[in-house]
Amino acid sequence: MIEIYFAQSTDAEKLLTVLKVYNEPSLRFTYDGDKRIIIHIDEKEEIEAIQNIVIPAMTQFMLRFIEDRLLLSIISNDFYFKDVEEQQQILQLAHSFIDGERHDYRKGKQQAESREHFIEQALTEFLSAHISFSFESFLYFRLKKYKEKLLHYVELAIDEYKLEQEYQNFIQTLRDCLASRPAKCSVVHLLHRESTFTFYDEYFCEISAKELRNLIDRTLIVNQPMYIDSSVLAPLVSIAPKAIYLYTRNSDDGMVQTIQNIFQERLNLCDFDLFLQRKQAYYKKIR
């Protein structure tokens, strides 16, 4: 008999829901309607039932219902983020690392074992067919490696959150700067090939790198807390064109996205092949 006590009756109900998915005759569950679950196991199948049913069920219960609570506790208590909106943003970023959507740049320094492995390992070492325990005590004392893994993901998430905050501040600073500048050119055509951007004026004449350097407002670079790209962003903001036509095959490129975020309604995103068509049409028109 495994007897588990919970601080919250809702947790007991959630574990019971997960256990019921494993419809095995060797197990019976008793729930007193308050904060205690008793798992009755057939003596002949104790080891198999614990390994194949109880441990997987409790692992899924923790991942589904307890993990976010632990992550939020780390965010709030270890890193002192008390604002609910900030906590939720960091939690979402932590999930993006957990789910593999974002690159874990510290991965080489971490244990390769999964979160599931650490939970299962702790349960395997702790559970027996005849035990009575507090679930909260198990969380606190038996899951050190699992919680270290969660701490790792929270650290990654906070790093990413701070970078995003700095990026947003950087974008807003450049927007404010742009709004206060007179336009040095009404239209700029910007051709994006892989990692390079080529500038053209409203007459489709290429603007050389030397000309671009001469157009840059040097105070713009000096006064920025973050690095501002001197080959693309600094010239664009310095020129402050009324309209930008950006021709690209990759609208998801990081610099393309940044230009969009700064120039907003001034930017017209166009297909790469449209540049040559427009250039040819313009020169036919003026002949």
Image: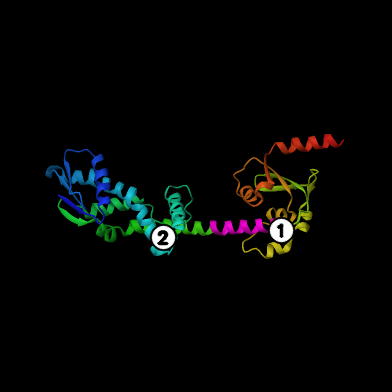
**Residue 250, image x, y percentages:** 62, 42
Residue ID at (46%, 56%):
85
Q: Is residue 25 left or right of residue 15?
A: left
Q: Given the current orientation, which residue lies at the most extreme front position?
A: 33
Residue ID at (76%, 37%):
278
Q: Nearer the viewer, mark 2 or mark 1?
A: 1
Residue ID at (64%, 40%):
249
Secondary structure mostly taken by the magenta-highlighted segment of the chain = helix
Q: Is residue 26 left or right of residue 167?
A: left
**Residue 24, image x, y percentages:** 20, 38
Magenta residues? 164-180
| Residue 78 image-quadrant placement | bottom left
Residue at which label 2 appears = 75
On the question of residue 230 being in view, the answer is: no
Residue at which label 1 appears = 180
First of labels 2, 1 by sequence position = 2
Of 125 and 171, nearer the camera is 171
Task: Tell me the CA gap for discs 2 and 1.
Answer: 39 Å
Residue type at mark 1? Ser
